[in-house]
Amino acid sequence: MRPADKPQDMPTAPGVYRFRDSSERVIYVGKAKNLKNRLSSYFGSDLHPRTQTMVTTAESVDWVTVRNETEALQLEYAWIKEFDPVFNVRYRDDKSYPYLAISTQDEFPRVFVYRGDKRKGVTYFGPYVQAWAIRDTLDHLLRVFPMRSCTAGVFRNAKAAGRPCLLAHIDRCSAPCVGKISESEHREVVKDLTSFMSGNSAHVIKDLQARMSAAADAQDYERASVLRDDLAALDRVREKSAVVLADATNADFIGISHDDLQSAVQVFTVRDGRIVGQRGFVMENAVEATDATLMTDALMYVYAVASGEEIPTEILVSTEADSVGSVQELLSFERNANVSIRVPVRGDKRTLMETVVSNAQQALVSHKSKRSSDLVTRSQALTEIQEALALASAPLRIECIDVSHIQGTNVVASLVVFEDGLPFKKDYRRFIIEDPRDDTASIKQVVMRHFANTNEQSHRPYRPNLLVIDGGQPQVNAAAQALNELGLGSMYVVGLAKRMEEIWQPGAQYPIVLPRNSEALFLLQRVRDEAHRFAITLHRDRRSKSMVDSALDAVPGLGPVRKKALLAHFGSLKKIKAASVEEIAEVSGIGPKQAMEIVTALESQTSASPAINLTTGEIIES
């Protein structure tokens, strides 16, 4: 570290700190009650090997002071999400679990099965292990709570037509789209369903039983039989989750199993004494991970986007969390009620926690066995690249640039990123080449534009360990020249030529030829092919638009307003070409005479247009 970063220059207040490497990349984020004491510990000699690696990699450290530990916890988690430091915890969900979701922000809320990241304005129940189970559950629930479950498009169409869909006819929807139920009445149905899914099933069951008895006493036996079937449907929903706790507990159970590098987390959701949801994910441990810090990381991740009643008032954990008071304060504020986080020590809750931890242990073993072969292969590939190119370290971040065009027109470029041998799509970039002359000029332009601000304090990605150019020596020389002009001449750049798959270095007389079966060549090919794929998608979009414009520009008297009207009416050039004179004449502003001119012009172009390979974007010779 720089001398200015030494302990005597550091405050004693609580805060969050960031270690950066020589490329200004944030490599580790940590929090402390006393920044001076915490950061002083990094200058000692008795450090864990991973901590020692982080400290020796770091070039500088900066920090932000805050008022208390709770604010430090919030800022630490925000920075970890923003910078994704390599020495901090990293999360890898082992699968995408389905949830039962209710879009509470809608005028008429919708219930549906959902996978993916949680969104604001939506209440979630689950997750569930299997999609078929939750769909079956939803079918039974809609019988008792007939709220809207259709998409926005179906809802709008039914409202416009004044006719409800099939679900309304089979009593699985109260048809708010056609006014059969008011907004306030529909929200009461939603409230009852939400209450039932939150574990408050007793009063719903009791209310149905009372209404069924009243209908029977009034000799309304048809109504009584409907209510009886509703009760049976709810019983089937409740039977899907076995009772595990006799005291109607509403809590989340979180268990962790870990080794030095990874942790598996299992979360069991218990409502009304029943397990109604289960999910799991794997974390790549932070550099100084302990049982307590790992549990804090897991809690922050599980409840990062949770709100309101999604957070239970009781959270049971397999081990005490670090900064547990701050985590409780954050969740209590979000829940608007006191949230307790504790370790169960006896009884049924302790027994269930042992089951949760056992599931976490099995998940960790399963994850490691599934990933081991792939991890070994990627590590081998990166090591082989390091040795073949004589790099100082393995290229943990590889960026690749590819240029795509057809005979010099619609020139675009892509930049893709691989980290640890895997695509890192968040940092992918696309470029539209301005005033293109040839491939080398295009490559130089992309390098200049992408790396121009790499030293500024911004959200731009940090420098790669290896920059790969799709091309031979002319292209790699152009990239190297651009880097030298930017003052980044130390960045390692190579070109991968398609003809013999040889590797060219700037100014080299001969290429490097890797064995055809080497993992290094396979990884470089995969990076290059991904860049080509990413560039081609943008090129096709621009080419399609250009083809439409050029085709319609050839029609006499057809201005931009009428071109726009044609495309709005038919949707694509292909459909315009397939339309008859009469159909084109129906478009606003276009009469029979101009319609005939359009058909004639497009027919003449079709007979003369070349065929194009949709995979490579190249013109096929006739």
Image: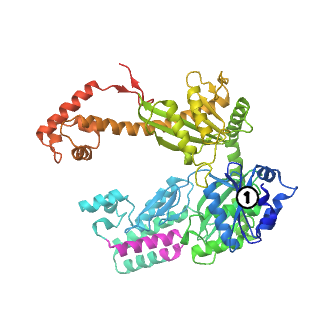
- Quadrant for residue 373, please give it: top right
Residue shown at 38% from the left, 77% from the top: 216
Residues drawn in magenta: 181-205
Residue of label 1? 61
Q: Is residue 378 above or below residue 17?
A: above
Label 1: few (<14), some (14–19) or many (≥20) C-alpha neighbours in 10 Å? many
Magenta portion: prevailing SS class: helix
Placement of the C terminus among the 4 image quadrants: top left
Magenta stretch: includes residue 500: no
On screen, 288 above or below 436?
A: below
- Position in image of residue 186 (x %, y %): 37, 71
Q: Is residue 196 magenta?
A: yes
Q: Of 20 and 487, which appears nearest the observer?
A: 487
Snapshot quadrant of residue 192: bottom left
> Mark 1 belongs to which amino acid?
Val
Q: Classify residue 158 as left or right of residue 133.
A: left
Report whether 149 appears left or right of 472. left
Horizontal and vertical percent for residue 480?
61, 34
In the visual, does 193 lie left or right of 590? right
Q: Residue at x 62, y 32 (%)?
A: 524
Horizontal placement of 510 versus 407: left or right?
Answer: right
Residue placed most toward the observer, 175 or 336: 336
Residue 618 can be seen, yes or no:
yes
Answer whether residue 357 is visible to the viewer in this image.
no
Residue nearest the viewer, comparing 161 with 137: 161
Quadrant in which the N terminus appears: bottom right
**Residue 348: image location, x then y, percent:** 71, 69
The residue under the point 28% across, 38% down is 573
Q: Position of residue 577 (x, y in %)?
A: 24, 35
